[in-house]
Image (spheres, helix red, strand yellow):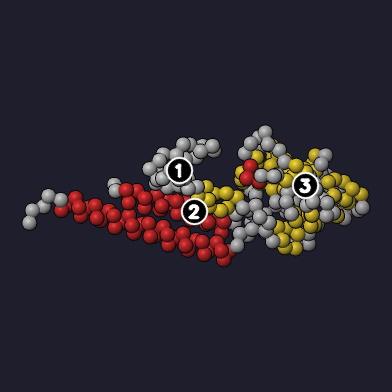
Amino acid sequence: MSGGMYLAASGAMVQQLRLEMIANNIANINTIGYKGEKSVFRVDAAGPNVTFPEEADGTQPLSPYAPPFYAVIDFSQGAVRQTGNPLDVAINGKGFFSIQTPDGVQYTRQGSFTLDPKGVLVTQDGYPVLGEGGSITIDNGQVAIGLDGSISVDGDTVGQLKLTQFDDEQMLKKAGHGRFALSDPNAAGTTSEETIINQGFLETANVNPVQAMTEMIETSRAFEAYQKVIQTADEATGKSISEVGRTI
């Protein structure tokens, strides 16, 4: 296989991965608190003929002809919409809600909470939402959630939402169902002090549908262009093989 075909094949694989990432973003446009992903390429000055060492996270480039491709999480804030549900809360600013799961504490921007049969504040899939003193139990009554995350029922304080922020949010990895886990178990966040909580609101996905569709079209066209290059190179190789040594 010619070097040109290797280059085209590597480019096509990168575009395919990018297309899958964009498609996932579009599929989650209506997911509450979803954080989209962005593609990042690392260009090495050593050139395409150098075999890159294994990356710190265990990944390797697709081929020596393609720069390493990464999908990084975009943690920018999404728009908020009003729901009127007293147990719906949106974070305005940095930080995450802390959730107790069987795999340890995880973090989310999905504030569509509810109560379990015991009155414990939980996520939609039943995991307790953590307060400063552990899980939060809410009795029957009028629930009010303050801008600082304090929770009161009929005027009596029953808990304080535990809000955690990270200096480097890229230390978080997606854990499914809108939650994030720390990639380094020894890392830790800090308490969010300037974050504002809006009761009766939810944060929508931070994916711009028009931009995402535009990127999908561009990526599809790039993938098709690489395919044509591969086809042309293959035809040229086949022609060379069939005609080499032919006498007229």
**Which residue shows up at 42% across the image and 59% down it?**
222
Q: Position of residue 137 (x, y in %)?
A: 83, 44
Badge 3 marks a residue whose secondary structure is: loop
SS at mark 2 in the image: helix
Q: Is residue 208 visible?
A: yes
Label 1, secondary structure: give it: loop
Q: Looking at the image, is mark 1 or mark 2 nearer the viewer?
A: 1
Amino acid type for the residue under numbered disc 2 = Arg
Expressed as whole percent of the image width and height from the top left, the position of residue 9 reads 37, 50
The residue most toward the top is 186
For mark 3, does the 10 Å Cα neighbourhood hold few (<14), some (14 to 19), or many (20 or more) residues?
A: some
Give the side of residue 157 with respect to residue 209, left or right: right
For disc 3, the marked residue is 192
- Disc 3 to disc 1, C-alpha distance: 37 Å
- Residue 230 screen position, x and y as percent: 32, 54
Please name the amino acid that badge 3 sits on: Ser
The label on residue 61 is 1
Q: Are marks 3 and 1 in contact (CB under 8 Å)?
A: no
Query: Which residue is more in the foreground, 222 or 140?
Result: 222
| Residue 18, numbered circle | 2
Amino acid type, residue under disc 1 in the picture: Pro
